[in-house]
Image: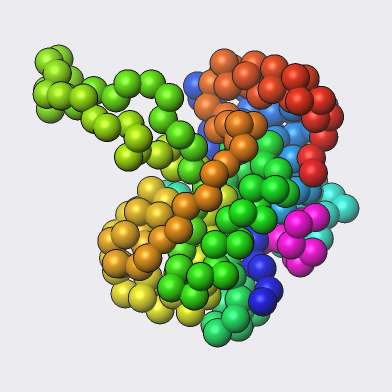
Amino acid sequence: MNLHCILLSGGTGERMAAGKPKQFIELLGIPVLRWSALTLSNFSKRRLTVVAPANLLAETRSILEGIDSVVVPGGSTRHDSTLCGIRSIAKEIHLQRDIILIHDAARPVIRHAELSRLCDLFKDETILCSSLVGPIVETIVQSRDGKTSDGIADRDQLRAVKTPQALRAHALRALLEVEGNFTDLLSWAHATGLKAGLALAEETNVKLTSQGDLDLMLSLLNRLKIDGPS
């Protein structure tokens, strides 16, 4: 089995108000994009495919210097960019035995342990797709109008979807038959009717959206004594 990793490096970072795309912001002196790329590259030992906005290809390649990677232009949505990444590795994939892993660069602190849990799900041959998830720790209220409560959801049956996510290469044929603009691989798999497995993410698997997220990452890294990518 070969593991092909696709890293989606989009986003403008407007909510960060940092004057640069959030994947270029530094975390402990290392760009967020490089954190994600190094961990995936070290785990898979294969060339990494990075999908970036067409106007940021040069800057992306500069940040990835020294990492075995190829940078390709993405699309207007996350789903379009995912398809761009898949097309770029199509000739390298062995449909019967390979796994494709897709990750968002905005989640820079991923650990080898959670990547292993994600891939181990494929020991069950009925699993065609997998995703990292986290527990729901707050009460979740249902509301159709956003103003009044329609009831409380059972959080024991709910999980927060995270990345990376992965799929068996031979499941691509079924996925590509379904049209849509899916927000992630798990929603795409469910629309296709594919059986998906879930693996627990580490607490450091935080998505960088705002300055508060960056502060949380720094706090976790300091507490767990993590000083760089895996």
Residue 50 in view, yes or no: no
Asked if residue 60 is positioned above or below residue 217 in the image, the reply reads below
Considering depth in this image, is 35 or 190 the residue closer to the camera? 190
Residue 38 locus on image (x, y percent): 78, 48
| Left or right placement of residue 40 versus residue 76 in this view | right
Please give the name of the residue rendered at 72% of the width and 49% of the height, measured from the top-left corner. 112
Picture quarter with the C terminus: top right
Please give the name of the residue rendered at 74% of the width and 40% of the height, measured from the top-left corner. 35
**The magenta stretch spans residue 45:** yes
Asked if residue 189 is positioned above or below residue 164 in the image, the reply reads below
Residue 27 locus on image (x, y percent): 74, 27
Picture quarter with the N terminus: bottom right
| Left or right placement of residue 23 versus residue 171 in this view | right
Asked if residue 157 is positioned above or below residue 209 in the image, the reply reads below
Please give the name of the residue rendered at 43% of the width and 24% of the height, measured from the top-left corner. 137
Considering depth in this image, is 185 or 48 the residue closer to the camera? 185
Residue 113 locus on image (x, y percent): 70, 48
Residue 146 appears in which quarter of the rendering?
Answer: top left
Please give the name of the residue rendered at 67% of the width and 42% of the height, measured from the top-left corner. 110
Q: Which residues are magenta?
A: 41-53
Residue 94 appears in which quarter of the rendering?
Answer: bottom right
Residue 116 in view, yes or no: yes
